Amino acid sequence: MIDRPVRIGLQLQPQHMDYATIRRTASEAEDLGLDLLFNWDHFYPLSGEPDGLHFECWTMLAAWAESTSRVEIGALVACNSYRNPELLADMARTVDHISDGRLVLGIGSGWFERDYQEYGYDFGTAGKRLDDLAEALPRIESRWGKLNPPPTRKIPVLIGGGGEKKTLRLTAKHADIWHSFADAETLERKLGILGDHCAAIGRDPAEIEISVVGNAESRDRMYELGARLFTIHTGGPTPDLTELREFLAWRDKINA
């Protein structure tokens, strides 16, 4: 059993605010003691005005690599469909170096149809997108072994999603972190399935950090189930770090 501390993530949703606000909020969150700072990989807002202010994921991560100094950074999650796997591996390796080894590669199969339609990607089916992710992950890992210079560390891979036949099997094989959007009851069941997938390939499931959406009402139960990374969310036009402060205080109490 791996004894992990609780960590707190913040998804700073890059919508409905200018970049100066995003940069200022990222710096404030880091100063508060945040562990991981995430954005997301979309081209349009997911809530509020559909055509509101919005910024791209990976150029922002490169900027965060320079404007922050301690927090890990990543996307929650990058969409596999939007970039060639070898290119994505190289982008991740580059941001890893810019940040002095603080990048987490969050990745998923994609789901927001407007992104695909507006930017000319084939939306296809959920099953096909997951099959594409299954093909991409070993290509990303292989490319990391060929790049010069190589990554500064084994870049942690976070897989998001809860599909029991495909996503959790990919998680068992490739992920260092699994991010679930499930409630506590569903999480308990899915952890059992993830354990079965790990057993099938001879992997200790304790090697995978369990990540969940931060919810004050369910976090103690999630902790009992094994969750150790709790991520809360804020966005524009006025990002609010009140919940983050409360979760950081809870983390410090749990980890003491």
Image: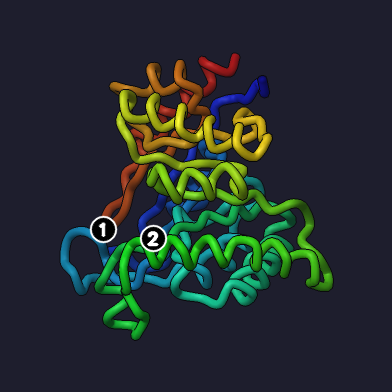
Q: Quadrant of residue 48?
A: bottom left
Q: Quadrant of residue 1?
A: top right
Q: Is residue 111 above or below residue 170?
A: below
Q: Is residue 58 above or below residue 196?
A: below
Tag 2: amino acid: Thr
Give coordinates of residue 235: x percent, y percent. 31, 53
For the C terminus, the quadrant is top right
Determine the secondary structure under disc 2. Answer: helix
72 relative position to 81: left or right: right
Residue positioned 62% across, 43% down in the render: 176
Residue positioned 68% across, 59% down in the render: 99
Task: Give the label on residue 21, or none.
Answer: 2
Tag 1: amino acid: Pro
Nearest the camera: 74 or 244?
74
Give coordinates of residue 247: x percent, y percent. 42, 28
173 relative position to 32: left or right: right
